[in-house]
Image (cartoon, rainbow, N blue to C red):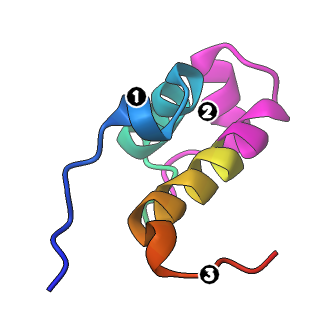
């Protein structure tokens, strides 16, 4: 049985990714139905409207990779 270690934000995400992802979670971007859009998230966090998508996409890519690690081959 494999144990899951606690996530260390420093190991997985950049500070910017961590902050935007945390804000997105707190403001309801991942809720159903969503309580905020990415454009609204951009305004509230003071970043350009196109930036949250890129930051969140990269963060969302790093998190599963950290869990899968070398146990799974990730095809490109």
- Residue 37 is left or right of residue 20, and the answer is right
In percent of width and height, residue 52 lies at: 71, 36
Residue corresponding to mark 3: 73
- Residue plotted at (68% across, 47% down): 58
Q: Residues within 10 Å of mark 2 (few under 14, many from 20)?
A: many
Residue corresponding to mark 2: 41
In percent of width and height, residue 38 lies at: 68, 43
Which mark sits nearer the N-terminus, 3 or 1? 1
Residue 69 in sight from this viewpoint:
yes
Quadrant placement of the N terminus:
bottom left
Q: Which residues are magenta?
A: 33-55
Point out the residue furthest to the front here.
Answer: 70
- Residue plotted at (57% across, 22% down): 16
Image: 57 above or below 69: above
Q: Residues within 10 Å of mark 3 (few under 14, many from 20)?
A: few
- Residue 68 is left or right of residue 36, and the answer is left
């Amino acid at each position: 049985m494999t144990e899951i270690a606690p996530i260390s934000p420093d190991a997985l995400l950049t500070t910017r990714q961590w902050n935007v992802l945390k804000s997105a979670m707190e403001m309801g971007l991942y809720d159903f139905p969503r309580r905020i859009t990415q454009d609204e998230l951009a305004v509230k966090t003071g970043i350009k409207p196109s930036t949250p998508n890129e930051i969140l996409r990269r963060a969302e890519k790093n998190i599963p990779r950290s869990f899968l690690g070398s146990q799974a081959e990730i095809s490109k």
